[in-house]
Each structure stands twice: as C-alpha cells, then as structure tokens.
C-alpha cells in the first residue's frame, strides 16, 4: 500500500485537508449508494412491466385461438376478423423484438411495436433499456429465447389460421380436414401456453434475482461506506501517531547514547517537518562512528564471499571461478576438470576470453562491459569453451557481481552440458522422424479413406445393377458375361475391404468391444452370408456347434464374425469341389469363462509345407500361380491373425497340398446371462415378413439414385429421391415417411447436418423418424459421429440387397 500514489498524497497534505478529504469521500459513497438504488428499482420496475406485457400477449393469444376455433364452427367472417385483431398484440411484441435484434436500433419502430402489444407507453423505454443492457444475464437471455420460440410458434399458428380460413371460405373442404386443422391449432395453443408459463416463470425468477441483487448491492455499499470511513479515519490517525511515535522512539535511543537511528520522515505535514528537524540535530554525532561502521561492513562482505565459495565447492560437479574485470583470480577443482588445465595454468591467462570459442568472444565481451558498469548484476546463459586438448565443449554459466573492498568482482558458477546438448539434439532429430512418420501415416489414412469413397460409390452402382440384370431373363452367354462382371466386382470389393482393415489394424484404430452376443447367431449369420458363394461353386457349406458349448457369451461379436467370414470365404475361394465345414468345440470351462476352438475345414487345394510358416503374413500366398488363378491381395489371413491376437486368441492351421486345409481359431470368452427372447431373423425371413414402406432417399449420385429406385420398387416399396439435405427436410415436412436413407457426403448440407436439423427443429413425430446412414467409407470416428448426430444405423456401399432389407426392417420395426 505504501507504493500507491494516493497513500503518498494523503501523507503529505496538512492535517486539516486530511479531515476534509475523509468527509468528502463519505458523501460521495452515499451519493453512489442512492444512484445505485434508483437504477436497480427502475430495472425491477421494467422487469415487472415486461411480465405484465407478457400477460397481455398471452391473453390476446388465447382470445385469438378462441375466435379462430369459433370461426371453424360458425364460419362467421367476423370471428375470423376478431382473431386477426387479437393477433395484432403478439405481432406487435414480435415487431419490437425483431427491432431490438437489428444492428442499428430504430427506437420509434420498437416503441410502436410495444404499443401495439398493449404495453404502457410509460414503461416502454425502461423495458428497452432492460433488454439491451441485461440481455446477457441468464434470466433475461432465457426469456428472450422463450420469446423467440413463442414468435416461431405464433408464426405457425398464423399459417394454420390462414389454412383454416382458406378451407372454410372455399366451401369445398371436407369437415375432417377442417377438424384436423382445428386440432393442430389446439396443439399449437398448448405449446404456446407452456412457453408463456416458462416466460413468466423466468422473468419472475429474474425479478427475485434483481430484488436480491438490490439488497446485496445496498448491503455492500453500506459496508463499503462504513469500512471506507473506518479505513480513512484509521489511516489519518496512524499517519499522525506514527510520526510522533517515531520521534519519541529515536529520542529514547539518543538518551541511551545510541546515535545510529533517525526518526523516519514519512510525510510532509507538520509531523514530518518536526521529524526532519529532530534528525538534523543528531547528524553530527553520527559521523563519529562512520569509519568503524565501514570497517565492519568490509569484514562482513569478505566473510560472505568465503562462505559462498565454500558452499559452492561442495556442490557435485559445479565449477566456481572469480574474475576481476577479465582476469581469473580463483577457480576450484571442478573448473580445472571441465577446462582440462591445472589451476596454475588457468590463473596465468591474461583474460578468461583466452579459452572461449572465437565466435562467442564478442558476445561475452559486451556482457562483461555491462557487468563492470553495473548494468547487469546477474546473468546466465550458455557458451562454448576450447579445452586444453582442443575439444570444444558446451557449458552453462551463472554470473553475479560481488563487491569486495570497494572492487567489483564476478562470481561464476559453471557446469559442463556437452552431453546434455548432444542428447537434446538426438531427441530433436528423433522427434522430427516421429512427426514425419505420423504425417505419413495420416496422409496414408486419408488416401485410403478417399480411395474407399471414390471406388465404393461407383462399385455400388456396378454391383447393384449387375444384381438387377441377373434377375432379368438372359441368354446363357449374357448370363456368363454378367456373372463374370459380378464375380470381378465382388473380388475387387474384398480387396478394398482387406486393404482398409489391414490399414486400420496397422495404425491401432481397431477397437475391441465387450458385450453380450449369441454364438449360434454369429455362426448362422456367417453361414447364410457365405451360402450364395458356396452354391455358385456347387460346394456344400455346413456348420456344427457342440451341444456343451454355451450360446450366450461376452466379447466382440463383430470381430468374431469378421474372423469367421474371412476364414470361410478363404475356404470357399480355394475349394473347387467338396465341402466347407464350420465346427465349434469346447476346450475348457470354468465358473465364468470358456475356451472355444472354431475350426473351418475345406477340401480345397491345400497349402505346401514350406509355406505354412508364412501363410499368415501380409501379402503372402501359397505361390504365384495361386495369386494368378484365384486373385486377392494376400491380406485375408493376416487380418484374421491380427484380429485373433487383438482379442487375446490365436490361429493355427493344418494343411496337406491337394487335400484341403483346417484353420483353427482358439479364444476365451466370458459367459453371459441366457437371453430370454431371440428377436434375430434372417434377411430372407425379414423380407417376407415386412410390409410396404415409404422411403425417402437423400443421395446426390444419379446412378445410386436409379439403383435404389429399382431395388425398392422391386420390393414393392414407395421411394422419393432428393439430391441434398435441404430438399430432404422440405420433402419430410410435406409428406410422411417410414424411414430415411441418408448419404453422409452430399453437397451443401451433408448428412450429419441434415440429421441434426431433423432431430432438433422438426416437431414430433417427424423428428423421431428412423434415419440410416449410407456411406462408401465408414471409419470408427465416423461411426461414432453417426450415432451422436442422431442416426439409428448405417449401411456400407456397395450394399447387398438382403443386408439392406434386413437393416431397414430391423430399425423400422424397433
């Protein structure tokens, strides 16, 4: 506090002025208190006026709804006109609110709006100040939000009123439609009633908050007035008593023949002048002990220097040197070890700069000049020293000026940091390598994502239309050609999926779930999905689960399904005749855990013995001829191995070339609680059981639009197609649908934003419509984002008809 200008000024004015100052400050604080009270009372009055305005708004709205519903029965235009007249009150308030939102406020327009809203003209200016000054206060802010929502629903009420008027005046509208409009008006009235109650409640809370704030502010100002008066009175009193006590204390010291103290002159008032005169009386006596005092200070400085040297030398590895100007006059053993010279050699140097690297000498010379002149009493930094053996090392130093017998000397603490600098450089290079690797990984992931999207989108049309063509009457030759196209497309899709799965696992992006699932359902789903491929090759596909294997387990069903699908697809791919069998056995069982062995056996081409050790490595196949005949990337079994190990399991195989292979997948699962109801249906069963649905498709790709229309029409479903999110919202507002298929990547408003708009802005039940994402590339982050934005599920392009049908029926049914 002693450093404040106010404190210094108060000390130095006369005693009379001090008293006048205290009285003036007290009067000013009381004026502030009265002004604050007036301001807060006006604010509270404006708040209550706004509450009263809400009452007029609410009454006019209720009367308008009554006149409108009355008009629905009487068809009397006077009732409709009365509805329009009553609607002017909330519309006037809306006009005022919109005027307040404009960058440049038109006060006349706002007053006109509030007058139309039946607010007392005497309260209008206060309400405007309340809304403009306190719009960020939570109560006012929330009230404005509710007001805005009310205007929105009033606008919808106007639209319903206009519709009702058109229906009644036209004379041709069925009574049922008029009643429907009247019901919607009642519903809108209920929504507005809730908003009006919330508005009144919020402003009521705001009023109580302002009342409490008034009390707190008045209490705070009252306390401030009291404490300020007490503080100023105490400060003035202390200023007077401190000077007198200082003079009395020094007088007692002088009476004991001790002339070392002086009365401190703490002000320039009458007390300060007295203290200055008293000090002048004892100055001559103080001079007699001056020489003795200087001698004592010199001895004390020398003692402090030696204590500093002793304490510093005891620190492990710390070098200590003392220089006067540029000459080194002392070094400890640590400095000798760092420099590589003995003590005598170092002390003979004309300047410490003799051992400094050439490019550092000018910088250190300038710092030395600053320290000698007193511009830098202490400094620290790094420099390079040339050792006796010629090696250049890095050192850290801290230099502090010390005064000994009137001479300025420099005490330096030195530490060898050569190894530290080398490690820092190695870490920097390692960091750069790691950052480069991370950038390369991200670029690779983005490339794979783009590649997936760009390839899967046309693949959806290719495979989809190929499937549709195969359902039409074809010649044998055409059937062969189209079948070849579908087979090639399926193989290409497998390659794309393998590359993306392998990339995710290499980058650590695969998440292992821990949830309940049915083992029999996983095996059944795998068999059903693979059965068409087996039938194409006339191969028998079967599955068997031992009776002692528990069905309800806890683990990652998605990854288990992926392992089984990869192994089964691999077996079918390399089997020309015979069969493929899936078998599940129980290896061991405890109270809460089981160890299972899932075996996929085929009668295919088998694997040579010299390839068994490397068959699970990435991009490895049995031989070059296998790659040419059967295609593929050699990633399928590598993915199986990594997925198995991520789940804590293992894979192995037995194979004999020309006779077939047996792949084993061993894994432990927790036991789950038995499920009571099995709601899972196969794709074909769900297709038979489903009713005709109304589908809205949001898709910007023309080929995919056409494909979807053909597929859904073939199922007997109705489909409407839009090209972007904005059109999807408009279509949904005007028509009822059972489900929306939403492309994620669309121009303008994408699928995520469109879903959020539907969930957050449309009324129930349209806001709750099932939405299924359609995407050509779905990462784990995108999958999470789908569900966070309100989507009910997703389907990957290119889609399988059966899978798509089952997905839609499952989500719509739930």
Image: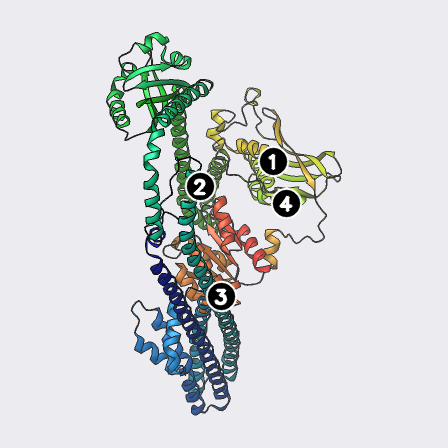
Query: What element does badge 3 sit on?
Result: helix
Asked if the residue at tag 2 contacts the one at tag 4, i.e. Cβ–Cβ closer than 8 Å, the answer is no
Residue matched to label 4: 515
Chain-order first, disc 4 or disc 2: 2
| Image-quadrant location for residue 752 | bottom left
Count residues near mark 3 (Cα–Cα under 10 Å), then give few for <14, some for 14-19, many for 20+. Answer: few
Asked if the residue at tag 2 contacts the one at tag 3, i.e. Cβ–Cβ closer than 8 Å, the answer is no
Chain-order first, disc 1 or disc 3: 3
What is the number of callouts on the image? 4
The x, y position of residue 68, in whole percent, is: 47, 85
Marks 4/2: CA distance?
A: 88 Å
The x, y position of residue 1, in whole percent, is: 40, 49
Image mark for residue 647? 1
Query: What element does badge 1 sit on?
Result: loop
Count residues near mark 4 (Cα–Cα under 10 Å), then give few for <14, some for 14-19, many for 20+. Answer: few
The residue shown at (55%, 19%) is: 610
The residue shown at (38%, 63%) is: 25
Instruction: Select label 1 or label 2 by which is in front.
Output: 2
Marks 3/4: CA distance?
A: 60 Å
The correct choice, above or below, for 438 with respect to 693 in the image is above
Query: What element does badge 2 sit on?
Result: helix
Image mark for residue 252? 2
Would you say residue 745 is visible in this rendering?
A: no
Image mark for residue 219? 3
Q: Nearer the viewer, residue 79 or 54?
A: 54
The x, y position of residue 86, in whole percent, is: 43, 85
């Amino acid at each position: 506090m002693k450093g404040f200008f106010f404190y210094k000024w108060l000390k130095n004015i006369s005693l009379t002025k001090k008293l006048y100052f205290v009285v003036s400050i007290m009067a000013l604080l009381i004026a502030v208190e009265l002004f604050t009270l007036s301001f807060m009372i006006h604010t509270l009055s404006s708040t209550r006026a706004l509450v009263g305005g809400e009452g007029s708004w609410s009454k006019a709205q209720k009367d308008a709804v009554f006149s409108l519903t009355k008009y629905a029965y009487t068809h009397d235009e006077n009732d409709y006109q009365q509805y329009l007249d009553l609607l002017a009150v909330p519309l006037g308030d809306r006009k005022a609110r919109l005027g307040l939102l404009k960058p440049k406020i038109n006060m006349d327009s706002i007053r006109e709006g509030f007058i139309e809203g039946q607010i007392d003209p005497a309260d209008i200016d206060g309400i405007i100040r309340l809304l403009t000054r306190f719009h960020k206060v939570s109560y006012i802010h929330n009230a404005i939000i509710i007001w805005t929502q009310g205007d929105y629903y009033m606008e919808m009420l106007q639209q319903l009123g206009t519709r009702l008027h058109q229906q009644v005046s036209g004379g041709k509208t069925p009574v049922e439609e008029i009643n429907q409009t009247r019901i919607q008006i009642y519903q809108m009235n209920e929504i507005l009633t809730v908003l009006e109650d919330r508005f009144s409640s919020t402003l009521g809370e705001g009023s109580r908050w302002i009342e409490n704030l008034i009390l707190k502010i008045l209490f705070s100002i009252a306390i401030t007035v009291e404490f300020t008066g007490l503080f100023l009175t105490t400060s003035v009193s202390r200023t007077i008593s401190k000077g007198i006590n200082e003079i009395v204390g020094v007088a007692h010291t002088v009476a004991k023949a001790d002339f070392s103290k002086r009365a401190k002159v703490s002000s320039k008032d009458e007390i300060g002048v007295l203290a200055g005169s008293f000090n002048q009386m004892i100055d001559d006596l103080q001079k007699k002990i001056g020489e003795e005092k200087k001698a004592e200070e010199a001895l004390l400085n020398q003692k402090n220097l030696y204590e500093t040297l002793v304490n510093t030398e005891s620190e492990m590895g710390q070098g200590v040197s003392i220089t006067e100007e540029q000459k080194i006059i002392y070094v400890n053993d640590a400095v000798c070890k760092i420099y590589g010279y003995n003590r005598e050699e170092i002390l003979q140097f004309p300047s410490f700069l003799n051992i400094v690297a050439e490019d550092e000498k000018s910088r250190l010379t300038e710092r030395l000049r600053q320290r000698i002149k007193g511009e830098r009493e202490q400094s620290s930094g790094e420099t390079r020293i040339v050792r006796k053996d010629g090696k250049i090392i890095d050192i850290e130093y801290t230099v502090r000026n010390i005064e000994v017998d009137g001479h300025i000397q420099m005490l330096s603490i030195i530490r060898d940091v050569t190894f530290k600098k080398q490690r820092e450089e190695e870490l920097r290079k390692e960091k750069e390598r790691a950052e480069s690797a991370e950038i390369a990984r991200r670029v690779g992931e983005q490339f794979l994502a783009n590649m997936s999207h760009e390839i899967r989108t046309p693949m959806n049309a290719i495979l989809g239309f190929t499937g549709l063509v195969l359902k039409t009457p074809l010649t044998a030759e055409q059937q062969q050609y189209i079948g070849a196209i579908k087979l090639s497309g399926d193989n290409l899709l497998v390659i794309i999926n393998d590359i993306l799965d392998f990339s995710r696992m290499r980058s650590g992006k695969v998440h292992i779930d821990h949830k309940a699932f049915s083992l029999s359902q996983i095996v059944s789903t795998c068999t059903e999905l693979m059965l068409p491929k087996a039938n194409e090759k006339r191969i028998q596909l079967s599955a068997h689960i031992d009776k002692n294997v528990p069905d309800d387990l806890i683990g990652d069903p998605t990854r288990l399904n992926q392992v089984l699908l990869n192994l089964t697809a691999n077996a079918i791919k390399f089997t020309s005749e015979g069969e493929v069998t899936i078998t599940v056995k129980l290896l061991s069982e405890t109270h809460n855990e089981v160890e299972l062995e899932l075996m996929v056996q085929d009668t295919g081409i088998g694997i040579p013995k010299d390839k068994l050790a490397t068959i699970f490595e990435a991009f490895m196949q049995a031989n070059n001829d296998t790659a040419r005949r059967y295609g593929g990337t050699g990633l399928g079994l590598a993915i199986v191995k990594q997925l198995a190990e991520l789940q804590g399991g293992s894979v192995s195989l037995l194979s004999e070339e020309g006779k077939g292979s047996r792949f084993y997948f061993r894994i432990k699962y927790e036991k789950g609680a038995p499920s009571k109801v099995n709601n899972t249906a196969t794709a074909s069963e769900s297709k038979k059981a489903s009713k005709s649905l109304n589908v809205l498709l949001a898709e910007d790709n023309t080929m995919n639009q056409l494909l979807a229309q053909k597929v859904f029409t073939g199922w007997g479903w109705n489909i409407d197609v839009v090209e972007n999110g904005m059109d999807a919202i408009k279509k949904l507002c005007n028509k009822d649908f059972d489900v929306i298929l939403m492309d994620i990547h669309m121009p303008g408003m994408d699928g995520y934003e469109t879903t959020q708009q539907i969930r957050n802005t449309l009324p129930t039940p349209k806001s709750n419509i099932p939405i299924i994402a359609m995407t050509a590339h779905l990462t784990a982050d995108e999958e999470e984002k789908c569900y966070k934005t309100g989507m009910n599920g997703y389907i990957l392009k290119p889609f399988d008809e059966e899978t798509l049908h089952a997905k839609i029926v499952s989500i719509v049914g739930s």
